[in-house]
Structure formats: structure tokens, C-alpha cells
Image (cartoon, rainbow, N blue to C red):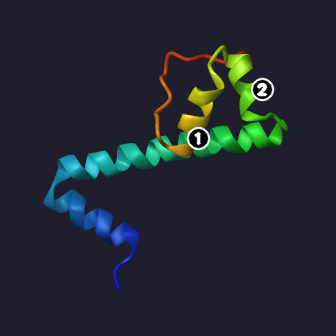
Amino acid sequence: MATWNDYKKHVRESNPEIGRDIDEVEERAKIVSAMIDQRHNLNLSQRDLAEMCGLPHSSVARIESGKSSPNSYTHCPD
């Protein structure tokens, strides 16, 4: 059985555009995962993070669940 990396390599060779789509989804997943990890490390709730960033709680929940993508222009205070 092939691994996920083997499959991605095959897709990239067969259809580079879909390969780039896979890469983009994986990058977004890394960003969201890091966001969740950091929120947990800081002992913040989704509601706390949303308030700090000036976003509705529902936006943070949708980002963390993968139903929405974060916008690069959204900035939370350091």
C-alpha cells in the first residue's frame, strides 16, 4: 500500500495544479493547528481569542473546525 506522501508525489506528477491544491490545504492545516496549539498553551478559550482579535466567536470556531479559512489581514495583538 502506498503512503500519503507517495500518493501526493503521484498527483503532483500527474496533475501539478491539484498537487498545488494539496500543498495549500496542508499549509492551512498547519497554520490552524499551530493556532489551536498556541491558544491551548495560553489557556485561552475560543471566545477569549475571538475577543482579543476583534472577531466573533463563531469565526474562531469555524476556522478551528476547518469550515472557514483565516484571512491574512486579520491581526491579533502580540
Residue 11 location (% of width, % of height): 22, 61
Nearer-the-camera pick, 20 or 49: 49
Q: CA distance from mark 2 to mark 1?
A: 14 Å
Looking at the image, which residue is at 19% across and 51% down?
16
Looking at the image, which residue is at 46% across and 35% down?
68
Rendered position, 62 above or below 8: above
Q: Residue furthest left?
A: 14
Of the residues shown, which amino acid type is indicated by label 2?
Asp
Looking at the image, which residue is at 61% across and 16% down?
75
Nearer-the-camera pick, 13 or 71: 71
Of the residues shown, which amino acid type is indicated by label 1?
Glu
Residue 22 location (% of width, % of height): 33, 51
The residue labelled by disc 2 is: 48
Q: Which quadrant holds the C terminus?
A: top right
Nearer-the-camera pick, 52 or 13: 52
Chain-order first, disc 2 or disc 1:
2
The residue labelled by disc 1 is: 64
Q: Residue furthest right?
A: 43
Rendered position, 24 above or below 4: above
Rendered position, 36 above or below 55: below
Question: Marks 1 and 2: in contact by CB < 8 Å?
Answer: no
Looking at the image, which residue is at 62% across and 20% down?
56
Tell me the element at label 1.
Answer: helix
- The answer to whether 38 appears left or right of 62 in the picture is right
Q: Which quadrant holds the N terminus?
A: bottom left
Instruction: Give the image quarter of residue 3.
Output: bottom left
Residue 63 location (% of width, % of height): 54, 36
Tell me the element at label 2.
Answer: helix
- The answer to whether 36 appears left or right of 31 in the picture is right
